[in-house]
Image (tube, rainbow, N blue to C red):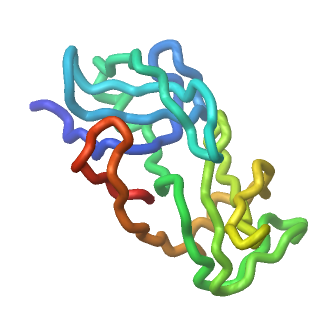
Amino acid sequence: MEPQLPPCGLYRTRQPVGTIPEGRLVYFHNHGEPGPGIYLPTGWRANRASFDGKGHVITVPDDVSSLEPLPREGLYRVATQFHCCEKRCRLFEPEMLVQLGYDRSAAAILFVPEWMDHAIAIPEQGTRIDRASLEHLIGLKLGTVPKDNEPGKARTLH
């Protein structure tokens, strides 16, 4: 019997998967040719990871179970007050708008948007938060816009 595959999305490796070490941010894609695989980040744009076009196929069933799911990158609101860490360096207050992103080691980072010249700007530097603090965030949904290269097609922004 084949193992149940998790949904496509962001994960952290809990143990080495092939040549990919423990503690890495990966994107898991559960279908396609030649099979399910994980993709490593190649860089970041607007605090969101871009992933390599060439993945690493997962052939060992235990490798799938070693993937820890992560909340999606994107905009969130703070539901309940919390501090970034035990040192209490930064306070995040209810109803704050934040952007969630990750670094290569899958550490969660919050970026706090600011009003600048009649527009919302999201800084390139953020604050790392403890993994347990993710429970204080509620994801927001954004509208859709047409893709530049596909007139008439729409995509949902998260």
Coordinates of residue 131 in the picture (x, y in percent): 63, 58
Q: Position of residue 100 (x, y in %)?
A: 61, 58
Q: Is residue 128 left or right of residue 55?
A: right
Across the whole image, how many numbered discs are drawn on residues? 0
Q: Can you name the residue that lies furthest to the left here?
A: 1
Residue that appears at 52% across and 40% down: 12
* Quarter the N terminus occupies: top left
Q: Would you say 110 lies left or right of 152 here?
A: right
Residue at image location 22% in from the left, 21% down from the top: 35
Identify the image quadrant of the C terminus.
bottom left
Nearest the camera: 92 or 155? 155
Q: Nearer the viewer, residue 40 or 86?
A: 40
Residue 39, image x, y percentages: 44, 26
Percent x, y of residue 13: 51, 34
Asked if 129 appears above or below 24 in the picture, the reply is below
Image point (65%, 34%), residue name: 104
Residue at 36% in and 57% down: 145
Is 135 located above or below residue 45 in the figure?
below
Report the front residue among 71 and 87: 71
Can you say whether 33 is above or below 154 in the image? Answer: above
Residue 120 vertical placement versus 35 (above, below): below
